[in-house]
Every structure is written in C-alpha cells, then in structure tokens.
Amino acid sequence: MVEAAKIEAIAAASAPIATPGRGYPEPFASRVAGRVRRPLGDLFGLSQFGVNLTRLPPGGSSALRHTHTREDEFIYILEGEPVLITNAGETQLAPGMCAGFKAGDGNAHHLLNRTMFDVVYLEIGSREPGDTVVYPDDDIGRAVMPDGSRRFVHRDGTPY
C-alpha cells in the first residue's frame, strides 16, 4: 500500500475551498452565500482543533448567530473591518483584532461585513464530540444524532 504524501506547508490561499453554506438548509444557506472557507487544519490531519481561512464578501455573514455547547471558538481578523455581533451588541473589528467564545457560555455570535471590501479572518475551534449548536435568532439548531452524525433541526426537534 502506498501512503499519501504528507503535506508540510502550503500557501493558505491555495487550499481547497469547503462546501458552501456548512450544510444549512434554506432559507438559511442563502444568508451565508458568498462566504469562502478554506479548512486548513484538515489538510494536515489535525483532529483536536480546526483552522479555517475565511473570506467574507461585502454584505456577507460568517454564519447564523450561534453558540456551541462544547466547542471553544476563536477568530483573528487579517483583512477588512467586520462587525462582531454578540449577546452584548455590536463591536467593530479591524485587522489584528481577535475574539474568543468559550464553550457553553451562551454568548451567541457571528460576523457581518457591512463594508465594500472583503474581510479575511482565521477561525479556530475545538472539535469536541457531542457538540450542539444553538441559533437563538432562528428556528434552527444542530443536534447530534445517536450515531454521532449531526443534523439540522427545528426548535421543536423535527428535522429539516
């Protein structure tokens, strides 16, 4: 058996692009349309945390506003000036700024690009089994099924 070549280093902007929309069903997928995520950590076989290089076009959104029950998240702004929306309100971000979100704290968050220029940032998150995602502004959640798969559900638990 021939083993695949191990990647030592790459130009991050040349990494393959992830599936758009993170699997959100409509009408939610269109709200993150245009976002381009490059899952960098996967290329190196990282399993304890994920790293994505993400580009938001003008008018773009990083995700639906959400919080994780078991996964920590961290963002670092490389280019552009997005607005961070959290439970506390809005915070204008700029290159060199960062923010973190502790698992289970209930602080729902996302980024919006209200400018005429692209926003580029790194998103880093732990990969904790059994994580559930709560979207407080929308009738959607991401639940873990008994087989370990993840599925989007309505607030009442019925699947999309």
Image (cartoon, rainbow, N blue to C red):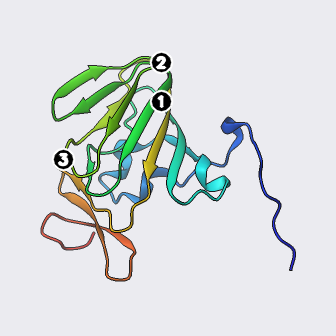
Residue at disc 1, secondary structure: loop
Q: Is residue 88 above or below residue 105?
A: above
Amino acid type at circle 3 is Gly
Which comes before the other along the chain, label 2 or label 1?
1
Task: Please give the residue where the numbered disc 2 appears in the rendered image.
Answer: 95
Task: Please give the residue where the numbered disc 3 appears in the rendered image.
Answer: 106
Which comes before the other along the chain, label 1 or label 3?
1
Tell me the quarter of the image containing the N terminus. bottom right
Which comes before the other along the chain, label 3 or label 2?
2
Number of marks: 3
Q: What is the quadrant of residue 53 in the picture?
A: top right
Assess disc 3: are there few (<14), some (14-19) or many (≥20) residues with their C-alpha within 10 Å of its C-alpha. Answer: some
Residue at disc 2, secondary structure: loop
Q: Nearer the viewer, residue 46 or 10?
A: 46
Separation of disc 1 and disc 3 at Cα? 27 Å
With 129 as the anchor, is 44 left or right in this view? right
Separation of disc 3 and disc 2 at Cα? 26 Å
Q: Residue at x 33, y 69 (%)?
A: 151
Amino acid type at circle 1 is Pro
Assess disc 2: are there few (<14), some (14-19) or many (≥20) residues with their C-alpha within 10 Å of its C-alpha. Answer: some
Tell me the quarter of the image containing the C terminus. bottom left
Residue 122, position as x, y percentages in the image: 51, 35
